[in-house]
Amino acid sequence: MQEIHKLLKIMADLRDPENGCPWDVEQSFDSIAAYTVEEAYEVADAIERKNMDDLKNELGDLLFQVVFHAQMAAENKQFDFVDVVNEINNKLVRRHPHVFADDKTRDATKLYSDWEKHKKKERAQKSLSAEMQNDKQNEKQQTSHLDGIASAMPALRWSEKLQKRAAHHGFDWENITPVFDKLNEEIAELKAEIVLKDNQQRITDEMGDILFASVNLSRHLGVNPEQALRDSNRKFILRFTIVEQLLQEDGKQMEDCSVEQLEEYWRQAKKLISSANKRK
């Protein structure tokens, strides 16, 4: 706790209008929001690389973002760091009655169902609070099952969260066959739009539908789409780097090679990686 108090004091000093850091003083919630997201990504990257030293460092950077937001809110008399901690403490206890109350359920499906019920109740309470603050006590505010899902998260993750929420309320296919059918349908619709001229917006729409349908397929397969794509990105980097090395060994420049030649190098790279993996 002593170190937390030290961190809070450092943050307050950085924001001091007279003696603080000019950059920190001029920041706002909006200006540092991007940094907060960036730090979360760097935490995820350290986890993927299984680098615990980097993870420790990045978690510290992410904690600093929380402290930064809390300090600015305290200056505006809105809330402070202790309020943030109290909020998450209460939420965790409230959402885990199987741990902190008499309900000792251990069934994962029921736990997820109860978790969603608690979150739905919290969203309803937030809506009611906002309604009262706007002097609309007599107006019935319509709420959606999709309320409360942050749109600022990565698009793949956002799609997955939307689909999971909808599925929890019965809006889902019972097996994977129609999921494949939907994906193929979206691909066919994109092909139909591509042949038309001056149709970039429709092409963009259909491409988005393909991505959304792909996320749905991932969800039905029990695959995290964000992680799957990140793994594919890293796999591409590895293969591409080997292609560059092979080209260098042959004294060739990538820009001077035909597509067919590059495809052959790509196959060689895949074989080299496959052989290396078999030897492990």
Image (cartoon, rainbow, N blue to C red):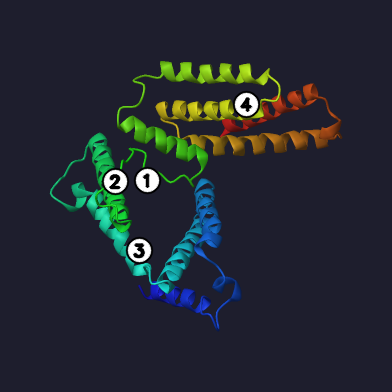
Q: Is disc 2 in contact with disc 1, using a CB cutoff of under 8 Å?
A: yes
Which sits in the foreground, 173 or 144? 144
* Element at label 4: helix
* Image depth: mark 2 or mark 4 in front: 4
Quarter occupied by residue 203: top right
Q: Where is residue 271? Give x, y as percent.
A: 66, 26
Instruction: Tell me: residue 165, above or below residue 69.
Output: above
Q: Check residue 203 in the rendering and tell me which mark sits there, or answer none.
A: 4
Q: Where is residue 58? Give x, y as percent.
A: 51, 59
* Image depth: mark 2 or mark 1 in front: 1
- The amino acid beneath tag 2 is Lys
Q: Which residue is mark 3?
A: 84
Q: Earlier in the sequence, mark 4 or mark 1?
A: 1
Instruction: Tell me: residue 199, above or below residue 228.
Output: above
Q: Which residue is mark 1?
A: 148
Q: Check residue 119 in the rendering and tell me which mark sits there, or answer none.
A: 2
Q: Residue furthest left?
A: 102
